[in-house]
Image (cartoon, rainbow, N blue to C red):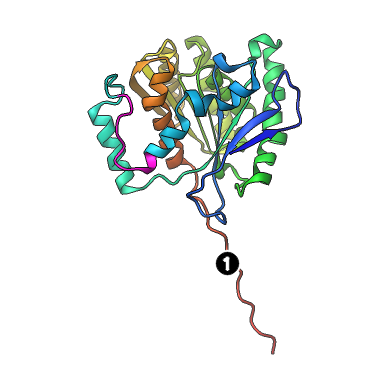
Amino acid sequence: MHDLLLDGDKRLARRSLLLVPKHISSGTRLRVLVLLHGLGETGNELLGIHAWGDRYGLVTSYDRLRALPVERALPKLRYFTDDHLAQVNRSLSQKPFGGMALLCPVTPNPYKMQPAAKTIDRYADWIEQTLLPAAREKANIGSGPEFTGLDGCSLGGYVGIETFLRKPELFGSFGGVQSAFGAPTALIYAKRLAEAIRRVGPRSIRMGTSSADPYKKANEVLSKELDKLDVPNTLSVLPGPHNQPWLREVGTLAMLLWHDRQLGVPRPPQKAHARAAPR
């Protein structure tokens, strides 16, 4: 665990938590998943960088994916259906969870820092120019889009999609968990995503939502419009509300497993080729 205090505007972002897996050989080129938190943790750096780990079940979900069989953490709530649980365990028995570094920066609230578009411009630049280079300095993380994913929860899902649209060349996989935007905005996002992917090439896209999520319709609209535009995407609608117990039980786990399947396989260090002895 690395608490990174970085250059940047305190009102925007200057701090991030970096979690580096111990189960992967130190010589292996790692993948990294950038995770943006929700509205409740904005305005407090410490809450922000620990939101995914302490409140959204990031570390426990990661551990559950590595310790088969995956079991329910909150069995009384039944957010994990029998079919979904069986599907997850079947997938993991066929291909184990590979793992990745996890990068959890402070996420700004663009609505409080108007104009919002300018705030996200600056935040996307900070991710590209400050955050990712700092993480790669601290750990053996690959630099191409095949090594880099982006996801966000609720407000973080909105900030995430806006960031991805500004920097699609950075990320090989992009998703949102209960992303907070409306259906009319989803129509606009679909067109912008299609344009971005035509420009930079194929990218993996996922919308994760739940049956009682107030943003469920918007995420469904986005997926449907992407289908119309021939943009491959994944829509996941699982039982449950828009809250942190749902994240801890199933939302974060499903998100991690999806990115694990989309990003490139971690690369072991290359062996130096032996040179022929001079004659």
Q: Amino acid at mark 1?
A: Lys
**Which residue is under mark 1?**
271
- Number of disc labels: 1
Q: Quadrant of residue 134?
A: top right
In this view, the residue in front, 204 or 277, is 277
Residue drawn at the location 35% of the way across and 22% of the way down: 237
Residue drawn at the location 71% of the way across and 27% of the way down: 14
In this view, the residue in front, 28 or 56, is 56
**What secondary structure predominates along the stretch shown in magenta?**
loop
Q: Secondary structure at mark 1?
A: loop
Q: Is residue 164 visible?
A: yes
Q: Is residue 258 visible?
A: no
Is residue 2 one of those drawn in magenta?
A: no
Residue drawn at the location 29% of the way across and 40% of the way down: 69
Q: Quadrant of residue 159?
A: top right
- Magenta region: which residues? 65-74
In this view, the residue in front, 208 or 109, is 109
